Image (tube, rainbow, N blue to C red):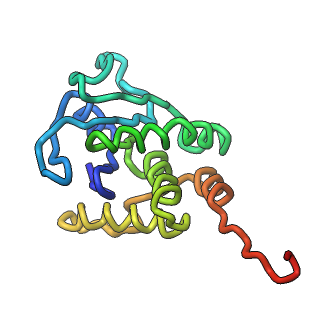
Amino acid sequence: MWRIDHRLYLGDYESGCSALAGAEFETEPDNVLAPFAGVVSLCPVPLDPDHEIEGPERNETEWLHIPILDGGNGEEEFESALTIALPFIRRRRQHGNVLVHCAAGMSRSVSVLAAFLCEHEGASVDEAYGLVADAKARAVAHLGLLPDLLISPAWEFQSALRRRYAPKPRPTLSDK
C-alpha cells in the first residue's frame, strides 16, 4: 500500500483485502489510527472463489466495488467507472483515508488516482501519472525497484484521461 497524497492511498489486491478486513492507518491531520473511510476495488473481489469477502469488516469503511478489465473493454468502461469513483473518493476522503486498488496497483488504480489528481489538484495527465509513480517509488525505494516499472497504465486509460483533461485552448484576440 502506497500513500499518494493527503488521505489517499494506492494498493494492490492484498492491500484491498487488508483494508476491507479493518486495517488501521494514521489519518491526517491528527495521525489517529483508524480504518479506511473508503475502499475502491477495481478488480474482482474476491479473486479466489474459495475466499469469501462480503464487504468491509468495519462500519466506518464504505466499499465501492467496480470491477473493470485492465483496458479490455476500452475507454468507455473506464470513463463510466470514473463518474462513480471520483465523487466517492472525494466524499469519503473528507472522513478519513481512502484506498484505491486493483489486482497489482499498476494500471487501473493508478489511472483512477491520476484522474483524481487532474480533477482536484489541477495536474496535467503526465504530471498526475508522474506524481503517482514518484510516490510509489519513494515508498518502495528500499526494494531497489526502478520508478518506470512501478506503474503501467493501459493505453486506453491514458487516452481517456488525455481526452477528458485536455488543456483548454486559450482565447485569442480573433476569438473576441
Specify the quadrant of the image occupied by residue 164: bottom right
Tell me which residue sits at (30%, 17%) in the image.
Answer: 52
Q: Which residue extends farthest bottom?
A: 173
Q: Which residue extends farthest right?
A: 174
Front-lying residue, 68 or 123: 123
Residue 130 on image: x %, y %: 44, 68
Tell me which residue sits at (24%, 61%) in the image.
Answer: 139
Tell me which residue sits at (45%, 62%) in the image.
Answer: 121
Please state, as top left, top right, bottom left or bottom right, where the C terminus lies in the image.
Answer: bottom right
Residue 162 on image: x %, y %: 64, 60
Specify the quadrant of the image occupied by residue 173: bottom right
Residue 2 on image: x %, y %: 27, 53
61 w.r.t. 31: above or below: above
Residue 147 on image: x %, y %: 36, 68
Q: Which residue extends farthest left?
A: 32
105 w.r.t. 39: above or below: below
Can see residue 102? no
In the figure, is residue 35 to the left or right of 39?
left
- Number of numbered discs on residues: 0
Tell me which residue sits at (32%, 64%) in the image.
Answer: 135
Can see residue 24? yes
